[in-house]
Amino acid sequence: MNGDERSATRRAYLRAVGATATAGLLAGCGEFGTETTRETTETTARETPREVGTAETTSRGDPERRETTTAELVEAADYGTVVNVADAGADPTGGKPIDSILDGRTGDDTLLYFPPGRYRLTEWRATGYRNLGVVGEDAALVPPEGEQNYWLMWGDLRDFLFAGFTIDCRGENVAPITHLSVSGGTNVVRDVTVRGHRPAATTALEVEAVAPDATLRFENLSMPDGSANGHAIYVYPESVGRLTFRNCRVEHWKEGLYAAYHSGPLRVIGGYYANNGIEQVRVGGGTAGALVRGVTVRVDNPRRPRNKPNMRGIWAEEGGFVRVENCDIAVTDLTGTYSSGGIVVGRQFGEAVVENTRIRTDTDAYALHVRNPIESMRGQRIPSMESLPSRTRFTARNVRIVGTASDGTAVRANRRDDCRFENVCVRHPRGSRHGVSVAHSEGCSVRNSTIDVTGEAIRSEDATVTTSGVRTDGSCSRGRGLFFRCERNHFVSQSTPEVSL
């Protein structure tokens, strides 16, 4: 095949890849209802993927930005070799393993194209490659029955693309592990669905970006079937690069997105995280910081609850700084289990800001739970941090908390000096639930807020809390100090300009 023929063949394959599916369902801006929605609170359908280290902006800031298709991602790269694996002898019916086909053709500057079909893999190791693309068109990768060990083992990759696949784990006792480690360049996993409820205590996806200049993005990754024993996504402590999860879906796992140990810039943008044990989204970010924007969290159907203790929503476990904004969180059913909060700031975490976010609690869990920070590294395991965070302030701004919870406290902050609550609305009209509780803290304030609860509006325990413009009755739909408006199916604040991390 000459150069012109190879280019023509390559273009034909890329056209076959086609446009990627639109990112997740869009969310409305209405009141919380009793029904559960699978919608995300922010659409990024008009966003082009950006470097994680740069500021993220919503679509209203740049109307020219749009989502890049998988074909365009591939087209932007320059693959010297293009392989149609079916033409090369891979069985597209799932009858025979294709390991030997891949082993003989995987290489640098290579695109492996999988046309429609089912491709059985015993295992696949790919290590040390540069500019490797693995792209499917309505293609499924099928592990062997009973596979519960490392299956896809990809390491030391640079400029890697994996897109357009279903990983079909619906066979008997199938729960394989995929391990992805990148060491440089821009790496993308996109439009990948993992199917099948997993019986084993294995992690579906282990990832790490082991170099500071490595970018790793997951876009439209869907993991809806879960596991009572296994984890969905685990980020290794060695991960130090730029890491983004955009419009991903993770449901019904023993643990959800576990990214606390990652010490580089971390972004979780959009997506739907629901009914996972321990956490829906757990972030770290080290001193580089983390951003959680436009994420929908639901705890409303805790399947096998004995396997899912403490179903937190967003958990900032360790790190220096996190911003949570434009998120939609609801904890409405904890039958057989419990939760320490819709948003939890852990003891090993530093400064946290929650903005333009709504939280519904129909159970007695906290909506916001800000724990007392540790005072020493002794005896602590904090992989993403070499020293204690320098700041531990907590700020909640333009936050709405509603629901039928009838006991406990909506918001609690402990040993967080200078904590600030601005334009916050809390409404719990049943039972004896308290509003905002501050303990062992100095210089805290509650301003321009509505706290309509049946218990005490503001409780202080060995703390100084100043108040200004606080009402103890009113509705959170148009509450005092709340200035949400609906824009392109997500809600933003009119009172506070957007601040990027």
Image (spheres, grey):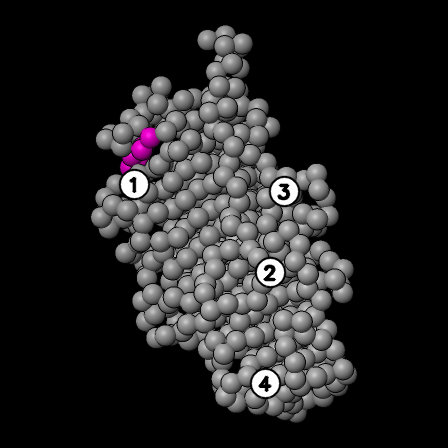
Label ID, residue 46: 3
Q: Residues within 10 Å of mark 4 (few under 14, many from 20)?
A: many
**In magenta segment, residue 164:** no
Q: Nearer the viewer, mark 4 or mark 2?
A: 2
Residue at the image position 71 percent from the left and 62 percent from the top: 493
Badge 4 amino acid: Val
Q: Position of residue 254 (x, y in %)?
A: 38, 62
Label ID, residue 143: 1
Label located before the other in sequence (4 or 1): 1
Residue closest to the far top: 2
Badge 2 amino acid: Cys
Query: Which residue is the site of mark 4?
Result: 453
Q: CA distance from mark 4 to mark 2?
A: 24 Å
Q: Is residue 474 above or below residue 89?
A: below
The one nearer the camera, 344 or 387, is 344
Q: Position of residue 328 (x, y in %)?
A: 56, 63
Q: CA distance from mark 2 to mark 1?
A: 41 Å
The one nearer the camera, 322 or 367, is 367
Asked if one can make out residue 387 in the rendered structure from this viewpoint, the answer is no
Horizontal side of 352 relative to 88 (left or right) equals: right
Dominant SS type (magenta): strand
Query: Which residue is the site of mark 2?
Result: 29
CB-based contact (under 8 Å), mark 3 and mark 2? no
Label located before the other in sequence (1 or 3): 3
Q: Position of residue 351 (x, y in %)?
A: 66, 69
CB-based contact (under 8 Å), mark 3 and mark 4? no
Label located before the other in sequence (2 or 1): 2
